[in-house]
Image (spheres, rainbow, N blue to C red):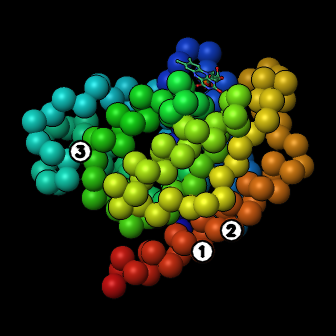
Amino acid sequence: MHLQIILGSIREGRRSAAVAQWAFEQASRRTAPTVELIDLKTWALPMFALAKFPSEGDYADPLQRRWAETVARADGYVFVTPEYNHGYTSALKNALDYLYAEWNRKPASFVSFGNAEGARGIEQLRLVCVELEMAPLPTAVHLRDVTGKSQDGRFAADAKEVQRFDVMLDEWIWWASALAKARAG
Ligand SMILES: Cc1cc2nc3c(=O)[nH]c(=O)nc-3n(C[C@H](O)[C@H](O)[C@H](O)COP(=O)(O)O)c2cc1C
């Protein structure tokens, strides 16, 4: 079972980097799944402008092919994204738009924060996941006061948030395992 934690903010000085690192460390405490942190900033995907529809699966662009190979090796995703204008980040939408089949039939869970704990952005993200044939899961982690709980580039969640993350991960593992078996036929 392989989990990718995808960090949606690419902004200079982003707070989400510490949150994604925290999520990575929380997930890594378990014996399974294996966990990988994917930072969209290091990918620097240009704004999607390729001729072919990703849903056709004919990826001519070398960077798109590398992105596809990376996303394909996961059994599901945890998206860590802040709320931007009541949505999620454009960098994350762009990264999602680049591919199609690689996202299909895999679970997606969510970690966010903001004025409404990032709830509005995650609701939008769930709808997009449905279109990409992911299984967006109900339990998300909505963090409070990320700024106050961050120091020297490290984020420390409170006990309730840690517990919520574990519940979310249990749910993710159930669905990732069920869907991996189903994909294998
Ligand atoms: C373009 C932009 C739009 C934002 N819109 C919202 C918003 O709608 N709701 C909210 O709670 N916070 C909003 N914020 C505040 C961010 O959620 C907050 O600054 C957060 O730290 C951004 O995550 P990042 O530092 O990882 O980029 C916005 C920030 C930016 C840069």
The residue at the far top in this view is 12
Distance (Cα) linking label 2 and label 3? 31 Å
Q: Amino acid at mark 3?
A: Arg
Distance (Cα) linking label 1 and label 3? 29 Å
Where does the image place residue 114, in percent across and percent down from the top left?
A: 68, 30
Which residue is disc 2 drawn over?
A: 170
Where does the image place residue 95, in percent across and percent down from the top left?
A: 36, 38
Please report the residue visible at 63 percent of the width from the left and 41 percent of the height from the top: 119
Q: Are marks 1 and 2 in contact (CB under 8 Å)?
A: yes
Q: Under tag 3, what secondary structure? A: helix
Regarding residue 37, the answer to whether it shows in the image is: no
The disc at residue 93 is: none
The disc at residue 174 is: 1
Mark 1 is surrounded, within 10 Å at the Cα level, by few (under 14), some (14 to 19) or many (20 or more) other residues, namely few
Q: Earlier in the sequence, mark 1 or mark 3?
A: 3
The residue at the far right in this view is 159
Q: Is residue 105 above or below residue 48?
A: below
Q: In terms of image quadrants, where is residue 34? A: bottom right
Regarding residue 179, the answer to whether it shows in the image is: yes
Which residue is disc 3 drawn over?
A: 65
Q: Is residue 66 above or below residue 133?
A: above
Please report the residue visible at 14 percent of the width from the left and 54 percent of the height from the top: 56
Q: Is residue 112 above or below residue 175?
A: above
